[in-house]
Image (cartoon, helix red, strand yellow):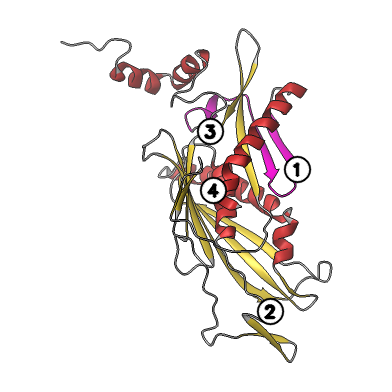
Amino acid sequence: MNIPSNDSPSSVSLVQCLDAQAHVNEFWGEKTRPDGRLFTQGRATQVVFGMLKHSAGSALVSQKDVEGSSSGTKILAATTFNIGQPSPEQPDEGEVVVQVSGTGGRNVGADSKSQQQQHYWDILQSWLQRTLEQNEGMSQSLHLLKGKACLRLVVTVIVLEDNGNVKDGALLACMAAWKDTRLPQVGKDLIENQGKLWWKQPTGSITSLTNKSRILVDGTIEKKKEVDSDKRDYRISLTMGIRVHPTEQTTYLLADPSGCEEPFLEGIITVIVNLATEKLQFDYTGKMPLTANDIALAAKLARARAMEVKTILS
């Protein structure tokens, strides 16, 4: 009988199944991670624009666990819009509505945990809604006629595969779908007649300017073409897990935590970067208080991530 050694793939898989925390801690103790990344290293990210033909804009974001791997986190976002009246309080702004669902993710297929799964999507939807509502550039670009007409933009997000850190992927998918969206313009696509807006085209629809290219986060671009010439306000986030060394009591930040790492983190910090103003917004949940050095490092990593993704959205 051949008994696998401690370093063989079989034994590693057995340890991972029997004691997942010990499996992850072993890598963390060596200052590395189960998928081979450094603590400050995010996963390779791909964005494909124009995935859905009949939406105003769409994009698919894939965060690969390992280079060349088919597994990871995959999120699809699409936009649609309709014309309505703005609120009296905001006569020159439109409305953004986010809807989140999932065909793949945690606890899928386990009927007893379906409510927990839905709660998971609801939290993500609430976070995305708040983030996009705070994007004044987006809501103001939905303005058509002050006090008379505006656009209601619906952003639909579908989590196709969840292997950790869906927040960053979902926000990037929203931003990429927003980039892919061509908005109608009064005088060009719409005309005002008797106090109402009418489509110039007899079909009553706007064809989105799609971008079929695939752009890698490292800046590699294949068959890229211009999507829209307007200036848009984009937000990019980087989520980092908090890991505290059990004996040294040293705090480490793990950029873009994977699904196998998330259950054993001491906390989560997400930094949202406004690409136009470079302002930062921090969201933190966890047991451990963060020091000024921890926050400074989180800001530095988030800015670096934003610069990587900027080539896709600018």
Question: Which element type, helix, strand or loop, lies under badge 2?
Answer: loop
Residue 223 in percent (x, y) is at 43, 56
Look at the image and say whether residue 265 sits in the magenta stretch. yes
Specify whether residue 119 is in view: no
Residue 39 in percent (x, y) is at 55, 24
Amino acid type assigned to the residue bearing label 4 in the image = Gln
The label number, if any, that marks residue 98 in the structure image: none
Judge by depth and name the residue closer to the eye, 287 or 183.
Answer: 183
- In primary-sequence order, the first of circles 4 and 2 is 4
The label number, if any, that marks residue 279 in the structure image: 1
Which one is in front in this view, the residue at disc 3 or the one at disc 4? 3
Residue 77 vs 292, above or below: the answer is below
CA gap, disc 3 and disc 4? 27 Å
Question: Which element type, helix, strand or loop, lies under badge 1?
Answer: loop
Which one is in front in this view, the residue at disc 1 or the one at disc 4? 1
CA gap, disc 1 and disc 3? 21 Å
* Image quadrant assignment for residue 192: bottom right
Residues shaded magenta: 259-286
Residue that mark 3 sits on:
42
Amino acid type assigned to the residue bearing label 2 in the image = Val
CA gap, disc 3 and disc 2? 42 Å
- In primary-sequence order, the first of circles 1 and 4 is 4
CA gap, disc 2 and disc 1? 32 Å
Look at the image and say whether residue 249 sits in the magenta stretch. no
Can you name the residue that lies furthest to the top here? Answer: 247
CA gap, disc 4 and disc 2? 40 Å
- In primary-sequence order, the first of circles 3 and 4 is 3
Q: Residue at x 61, y 7 (%)?
A: 247
Residue that mark 2 sits on:
186
Amino acid type assigned to the residue bearing label 3 in the image = Gly
